């Protein structure tokens, strides 16, 4: 009988394919005896294997061909499967592809055949497989810690909270994969910031503990392995931004000054003199924003959460001029955003991704700071909540955070890659941390060396992820 166009539902998603190394997983046909399914397609990656799962209406689709393309090669048929005869139900199908190359762009597409001998292709987002290596566990579990890489390549974990805020620091040694106990902070804190100075010291600012917000700072000297008090800021800052400027100074912008009270205060730190200087306040107090220094030296602040409408996200952007010493409102983002990320993809061009505000979290924007306007871009493959990014220094940017699919929050932490050269989004491995609490509070990440990042979970785990593109 004649039917409509083949009905094949596909939605890009990631979850762990936890098969043991060497285990054979054959292509299988899974019957789903219900008219619809919640997760109608999945792509699962483990080591060098990818499992694809898809669903289709049995009365419409009679057969499938799965095609694969690696790098610049042509598509080739790698599997054919007859459709299930379980009218009028939806059937689910899966296939596992083995022994795939790392660091090569891989693309799949499914050709579905109908009873009327017509066919239709469904493209699946491209992916690239990186290499994940488990590292040693650190000693003191925590969340909202800060990871900061030293000039010699080691990583210092500073502060964080695990009831209550911790004073402990730990140091990761890349050569051995071990964590060593470090010196104690004078003040336990979370929501703080840590930044490597040109001198090689690490500056720690602000944060909160037990409902108190801090203006205090501390300096870590990796040579002596000790913390010392730094000059206090003029105001408390929590969940602020701290930006290293080209001249070596440090800019702190906004954040919270007390519980649920946003700050418009901005301060400049001179590490040579250990002095803080207050500059003009923001026009709109905010936290959870992003801050960038532009090529002309001006400062751009975008998005975040404000006092407006009981702390809802904002699309507003502000520009600070050192020549005038003032902030001015500039063209806003296309969407209001909180829990978002932003990173430079070219000179004064900033890609803004993710966030969570009434369904706008999938919209991608390119903020052209030179012309002070934001342009909508094709949506990313996944939407995220509490997203961060690590620039791998090889033209690739790695995005991580909790995956958000509407009300479904039970999926692992996926990684997603943005290729600056091509403007392409790629799916890749997810972070296989075992502790499920990471779905609520996320993970930390930091660049170890070009093409390699270190990630830590809230429950002592750490791993490295290496990725490059062999074009």
Image (tube, helix red, strand yellow):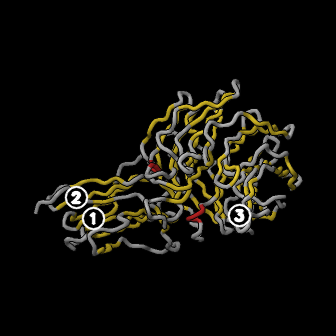
How packed mark 2 is, by other alpha carbons closer than 10 Å (few <14, some 14-19, many 20 or more), is many
Query: Dividing the picture into quarters, in which one does residue 190 lie?
Result: bottom right
Q: Tell me which residue sits at (11%, 60%) in the image.
A: 2
The answer for how far apart the CA atoms under marks 2 and 3 are is 52 Å
* Secondary structure type for disc 1: strand
- Sequence order check: which comes first, mark 1 or mark 3? 1
Q: Where is mark 3, residue-wise?
A: 161
Q: Tell me which residue sits at (65%, 50%) in the image.
A: 261
The answer for how far apart the CA atoms under marks 2 and 1 are is 8 Å
Query: Can residue 136 be seen?
Result: no
- Between 34 and 68, the one nearer to me in the picture: 34
Q: How many marks?
A: 3
229 left or right, relative to 467 = right
Q: Where is mark 1, residue-wise?
A: 56
Which mark, residue 6? 2
- Sequence order check: which comes first, mark 2 or mark 1? 2
Q: Tell me which residue sits at (65%, 62%) in the image.
A: 456
Which mark, residue 266? none
């Amino acid at each position: 009988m004649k039917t409509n166009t083949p009905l094949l539902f596909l939605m890009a998603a990631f979850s762990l394919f936890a098969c043991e190394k060497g285990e054979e997983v054959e292509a299988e046909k899974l019957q789903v005896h219900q008219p619809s399914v919640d997760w109608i397609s999945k792509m699962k990656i483990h080591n060098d294997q990818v499992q694809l799962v898809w669903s289709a209406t049995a009365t419409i689709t009679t057969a499938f061909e799965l095609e694969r393309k690696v790098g610049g090669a042509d598509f080739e048929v790698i599997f054919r499967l007859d459709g299930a005869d379980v009218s009028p139900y939806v059937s689910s199908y899966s296939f596992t592809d083995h022994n795939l190359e790392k660091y090569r762009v891989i693309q799949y597409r499914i050709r579905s055949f109908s009873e009327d001998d017509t066919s239709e292709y469904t493209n699946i987002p491209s992916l690239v497989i990186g290499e994940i290596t488990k590292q040693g566990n650190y000693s003191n579990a925590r969340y909202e810690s800060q990871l900061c890489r030293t000039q010699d390549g080691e990583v210092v974990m500073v502060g964080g909270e695990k009831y209550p805020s911790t004073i402990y620091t730990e140091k990761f040694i890349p050569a051995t994969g071990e964590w060593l106990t470090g010196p104690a902070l004078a003040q336990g804190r979370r929501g703080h910031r840590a930044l490597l100075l040109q001198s090689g010291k690490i500056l720690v600012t602000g944060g909160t503990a037990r409902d108190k917000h801090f203006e205090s700072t501390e300096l870590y000297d990796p040579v002596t392995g000790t913390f010392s008090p730094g000059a206090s800021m003029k105001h408390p800052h929590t969940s602020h931004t701290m930006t290293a400027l080209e001249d070596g100074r440090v800019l702190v912008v906004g954040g919270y000054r007390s519980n649920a009270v946003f700050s418009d205060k901005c301060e400049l730190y001179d590490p040579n003199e250990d002095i803080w200087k207050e500059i003009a306040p923001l026009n709109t107090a905010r936290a959870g924003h992003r801050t960038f220094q532009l090529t002309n030296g001006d400062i751009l602040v975008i998005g975040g959460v404000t006092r407006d409408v009981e702390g809802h996200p904002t699309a507003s952007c502000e520009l600070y001029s050192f020549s005038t010493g003032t902030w001015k409102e500039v063209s806003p983002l296309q969407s209001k955003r909180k829990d978002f990320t932003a990173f430079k993809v070219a000179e004064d061009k900033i890609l803004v991704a993710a966030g969570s505000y009434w369904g706008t979290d999938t919209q991608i924007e390119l903020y052209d700071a030179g012309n002070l306007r934001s342009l909508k871009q094709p949506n990313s493959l996944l939407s995220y909540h509490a997203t961060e990014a690590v620039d791998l220094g090889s033209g690739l940017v790695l995005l991580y955070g909790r995956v958000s699919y509407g009300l479904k929050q039970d999926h692992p932490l996926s990684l997603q890659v943005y290729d600056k050269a091509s403007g392409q989004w790629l799916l890749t491995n997810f972070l296989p941390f075992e502790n499920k609490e990471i779905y609520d509070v996320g993970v930390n990440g930091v660049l170890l060396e070009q093409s390699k990042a270190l990630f830590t979970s809230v429950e002592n785990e750490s791993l490295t992820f290496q990725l490059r593109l062999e074009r």
